[in-house]
Amino acid sequence: MRLPIRCLSIVTLVAGCPYDPATPEYDVITDTDGSSSGAETLSSTISPTEPTTEGPTSPSTTAVDTTDADTTGNAGVCGDGEIGGAEVCDDGTNDGSYGGCMPGCAALGPSCGDEEINGAEVCDDGTNDGSYGGCAAGCKDLGPYCGDGDLQEPELCDTGDSNQDGSGCNVDCVTSGTVVGTYLVGGLSFCDGSFVTPPVFRADGNALVSASGYCEQDSVLLAELSPEVELVQEFGDLLFPQTPMREATLAGDNWLLASYGCTYAVTPMGELTEACDPRIAGGSGLAARDDGSYIALDYEVFASYPAGSPSDGDVADWQVTAPDNAVFDYSYYAAAIGPSDSAIVVGSRRQLANNAYLGYLVRHTAAGNEVGSLTYAGIEQLERVAVGSGGDVAVSSGYPAYRVMRLGADFSETWGLDLPSNSDVLIGVDSTGAVVMGYVDAVTNGGVLRKWTADGATELWSIEVESAGYGARLAIAPDDSIWIASASGNGFGVARISP
């Protein structure tokens, strides 16, 4: 029977067992020169251990010291007021009170610096170094912050409790009407003018914008921008040149773009769906409801499509054609989703007998039923309509009388403002009902952006902007910031302005 082999481990001498299977004896371990290795020598032969049939060796009965002692010998007795062993804290009481120790001495009690507001603390960010927007030392006070009434970096203004969007100093301590971000692209080509769609906004605040043209060599730009107006992604090569995109909206997660004849849906991942004739594409107006359904306007006809559209062969829920007759001829220019998911369409009504024009508005319910129409004296056509998040409605007119009107619940004018413009008037309504308007001043030929209170009594601010007309588009973001997109020559730009 072969005997088991045991190794005597001598770390500084050799690795492994010095056993030669051909030699049943264990020899003295020596260095290669024959001398003994180290200070001690194995001076005698070590006999192999005899096998046993008595089972496993009994555990050692030698006493083991389990006292939790640190390197100084402190045994770490919780409650003795000294930190020892594995203790983290020991104040003698260890009752979990503020600034003290937790029971068991394994953790600190609540304290300044634990990133939780406890006891008499006012603020605790873990650092508490008095930096801007943070907490002061000792956790007894806030550090400098927007709203404390003191002007400090990076603030542009601070009126304390009076900070309010549109008041001159906004809630984020940025001066009202300040350009706070821009996105510019050069090297583009638009042979015969460009088409820019209004910015539309995802739930995360990102904006989707596009620019395109008529000609085969024209550029096509589709971009998603962050709230800071920085490029998130471009949807390159989705659409070919000669695809002028005129309108846009966001239906669910899909970005809808409309040219005359086709509607395009771009998913967040950049996948494209194209739906063309026969359908109402939305080249004159496109607006979505919260449920993903949307309305599309082409010239003198508009329709409502269900959520999930567009797709080839899909059918409108309902469709309405302008009520032309022997007395009047109607033209539609823009559309929006109004209160109670209604469809609001604006344009003009022409009297055939004398060729007289009046601005015209018609409203249909979400089911497509007409619930009223109005004409507006002194205005030949309404060219744009905007609806705020609270359902507030404003409209603007074009040549020859440029005017902005705020409408009441019955869509009659509650106040109006004539503008010294020589361009289309851009318009938007924010969450407070305030009206924003942009245009090119007829005297200075420069772009102007203005904001008025909901009641029309006060102009909140007015600034010069590089482009606010001639094909530019305006939209109000969910945070009430104003976005303007425009293209000219070989460039395209987007500006974000504080509310």
Image (cartoon, helix red, strand yellow):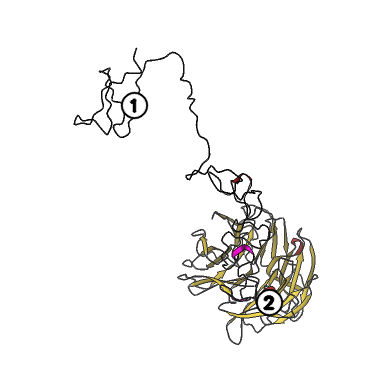
Between the C-alphas of marks 1 and 2, the distance is 87 Å
Q: Could you tell me which quadrant the N terminus lies in?
A: top left
Q: Is residue 104 above or below residue 323?
A: above
Q: Could you tell me which quadrant the C terminus lies in?
A: bottom right
Image side of residue 320 versus residue 267, left or right: right
User: Which disc, if any, is residue 328?
Assistant: none
Q: Earlier in the sequence, mark 1 or mark 2?
A: 1
**Could you tell me residue 453's position as x and y percent?**
72, 76
Dot 1 falls on a residue whose secondary structure is loop
Secondary structure that dominates the magenta span: loop
Amino acid type at mark 2 = Ser
In the image, 426 versus 259, the foreground residue is: 426
Amino acid type at mark 1 = Leu
**Could you tell me residue 469's position as x and y percent?**
60, 77
Q: Is residue 252 above or below residue 332?
A: above
Residue that badge 2 annotates:
167
Q: Quadrant of residue 171?
A: bottom right
Residue closest to the far bottom: 443
203 part of magenta stretch = no
Image side of residue 180 versus residue 13, left or right: right
Q: Which stretch did the figure color magenta?
A: 137-158
**Could you tell me residue 123's position as x and y percent?**
64, 62
Dot 2 falls on a residue whose secondary structure is loop
**Residue 261 visible in image:** no
Q: Residue at x 55, y 43 (%)?
A: 76
Residue that badge 1 annotates:
8
Callouts 1 and 2 close, C-beta under 8 Å: no
